[in-house]
Amino acid sequence: MSLHGRLEADAEIKSPATKFHQVFTHRPHHISNINFDKVQACDLHEGDWGKEGTVICWSYVHDGKAKTSKQILDRIDYENNLMTFHLIGGDLMEEYKSFRITFQAIPKENGEGSRVHWIFEYEKLHDEIVHPETLLDFLVALSKDIDAHLVEQP
């Protein structure tokens, strides 16, 4: 069994792609206001919101357990509503040697809504570690929560 893995999933949303992307680039610290049951905080540790190289730390509840994730924002592509970051600390680093998350908010061709495409690329520490499907499901569900909030906003 390979220690390297890649998982992908999509979330269909009603919000414009740019509006969804901006939540993660410039206002991730507001996500706890959208769904505190899933995300309790997003703290800026180094750098500035919306800038590559920024270090942030998430506090969240996944599979019924409080967890943290410290990440560096590697790439922001505003034109394509894409963002990539890699983990440098937190609970996932106890099971994975490396973990990179990419998401892209893609406008639908008919102009009504968007699709959020999530990608996980990772290397497990050993074969007994499960693939992070439930974490991917968590982000798809969170995407829909964020979308519901954005749709309510003027």
Image (cartoon, grey):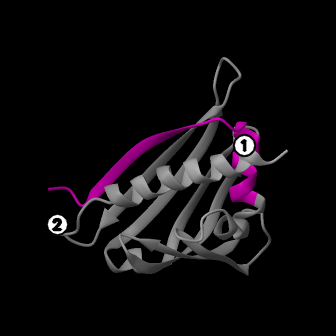
Q: Is any part of residue 75 visible from this angle?
A: yes
In the rendered view, does 47 fall on the left or right side of 55? Answer: right
Callout 1 amino acid:
Val
Classify 33 as above or below 89.
above
Mark 2 or mark 1, earlier in chain = 2
- In percent of width and height, residue 133 lies at 32, 55
In the rendered view, does 16 fall on the left or right side of 121? Answer: right
- In percent of width and height, residue 11 lies at 51, 41
Q: Which residue is mark 2?
A: 127
Q: Is any part of residue 53 visible from this angle?
A: no
- In percent of width and height, residue 82 lies at 65, 45
Residue drawn at x 31%, y 53% as measured from the top left: 5
Under circle 1, the secondary element is helix
Task: Name the quarter where the C terminus is drawn.
Answer: top right
Q: Dot 2: few (<14), some (14–19), or many (≥20) neighbours within 10 Å?
A: few
Residue drawn at x 40%, y 60% as measured from the top left: 135
Q: Which residue is mark 1?
A: 151
In the rendered view, does 65 fall on the left or right side of 29? Answer: left
Single out the residue that lies furthest toward the right: 154
Most foreground residue, 139 or 99: 139
Under circle 2, the secondary element is loop
Q: Which residues are magenta?
A: 1-25
Q: Residue 16: within the magenta?
A: yes
Most foreground residue, 142 or 104: 142
Callout 2 amino acid:
Asp
Question: For the residues marked 2 and 1, what is the alpha-carbon distance in whole angstroms?
Answer: 42 Å
Which quadrant of the structure image shows residue 98? bottom left
